[in-house]
Amino acid sequence: MNNKKLIMKKTSNYFAMGALVLASLFTVSCDDDDDNNGNNNQTIAEIAVGNDNLSVLVDALNRTGLTATLDGSGSYTVFAPTNQAFNSFLQANGFANVEAVPVATLREILLNHVMTTENMSSSLTTGYVKTMAKGSASSTNTLSMFINTSSGVVLNGGTSNGGANVTTADIDASNGVVHIVNGVIGLPTVVNHAIANPNFNGLVMALTRADQPHFAGILGGTGPFTVFAPSNGAFNSLVTELSLNSIDDVPQSVLENALKYHVIAGSNVLSAQLTNNMMVTTFQGQQFTVELPSSGPQIKDANNRISRITTVDVQASNGVVHAIDKVLLPGS
């Protein structure tokens, strides 16, 4: 009898301990879910309203009618500029406050901070994404944004290039995610896109060489422009092809004519508009030929040299950029 009572007592203790462990596990599980979900019962608009450091953004959203968009259903990624970021932007552009910015302009700037897919910081990779904004160069192709994740998350080259850095990531919302940034992301020109992407460092060095025309000013203008942008590898190959030591050794007139030969002035030519054996007149005055073999689009220059088009439709506010793997050379 005593043994039976002892067994029952031990069994009762085991059940109590088991119940306590299960309760603890349940509590930990709930706490973990709360931590991971953060504010996910709030919309992006509600999160912005609840953050005093985003009050200027809230004013801008209200003024442009975009609050309803970010308060509704969907799956968005929003790069949210702080009050300080907005104030710096307004001052740099000569605006007294948000109310002084034309509504149409303000709306596109805000849309340039929004992606139509939810992307936590862990899913962001170096490369191009599309925002919801449009520039003046294309009515169909929305603006591109270059994200660089090699050191944090840098957008369009950072604040020195009209972009921003993510300072607080992964604020979860019911309709997407918010990443707080330290700059207002302006509508990028083709020059901004060239500067933002490290794979175009050689092109930027060539465009800004002291003996060249003010290409940054030209390509940063109204446009539209279509730019076939050689990669760093393309410029390295050119130096080897010309038996030189560096891009600095390319004669002034050769470099100027070559750079102009990569630009179509007055048109925003998207990849879908390229046709086989299409003859293209460049800013330099001479033509090159677009070819569309099964291996992918390419360009044949005036010297019958072939350059493959490796990236297409990088949309800027004043034009579009297509990356190529060989520097094009006009005829002599």
Image (cartoon, rainbow, N blue to C red):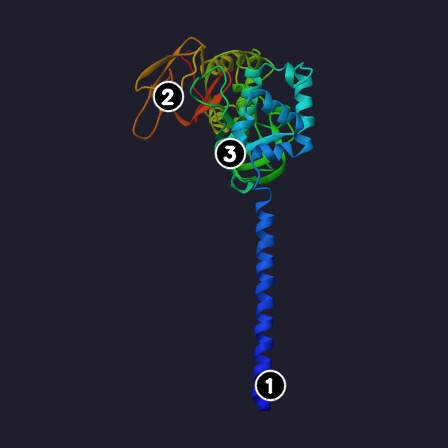
Q: Name the residue located 57 percent from the left edge and 34 percent from the top edge.
A: 44
The answer to whether 47 is drawn above or below residue 103 in the figure is below
Kindly identify the amino acid type of the residue bearing the numbered disc 1.
Answer: Leu
Mark earlier in primary sequence (1, 3) = 1
Q: Nearer the viewer, mark 1 or mark 3?
A: 1
Q: Nearer the viewer, residue 211 or 36?
A: 36
Mark earlier in primary sequence (2, 3) = 3
Kindly identify the amino acid type of the residue bearing the numbered disc 2.
Answer: Ile
Q: Nearer the viewer, residue 217 or 88?
A: 88
- Per the rendering, the mark at residue 6 is 1
Q: Name the residue located 35 percent from the left edge and 19 percent from the top edge.
A: 273
Q: Which residue was labeled with disc 3? A: 76
* x, y percent for residue 233: 48, 29
Q: Which residue was labeled with disc 2? A: 299
* x, y percent for residue 72: 51, 32
**Residue 113 quadrant:** top right
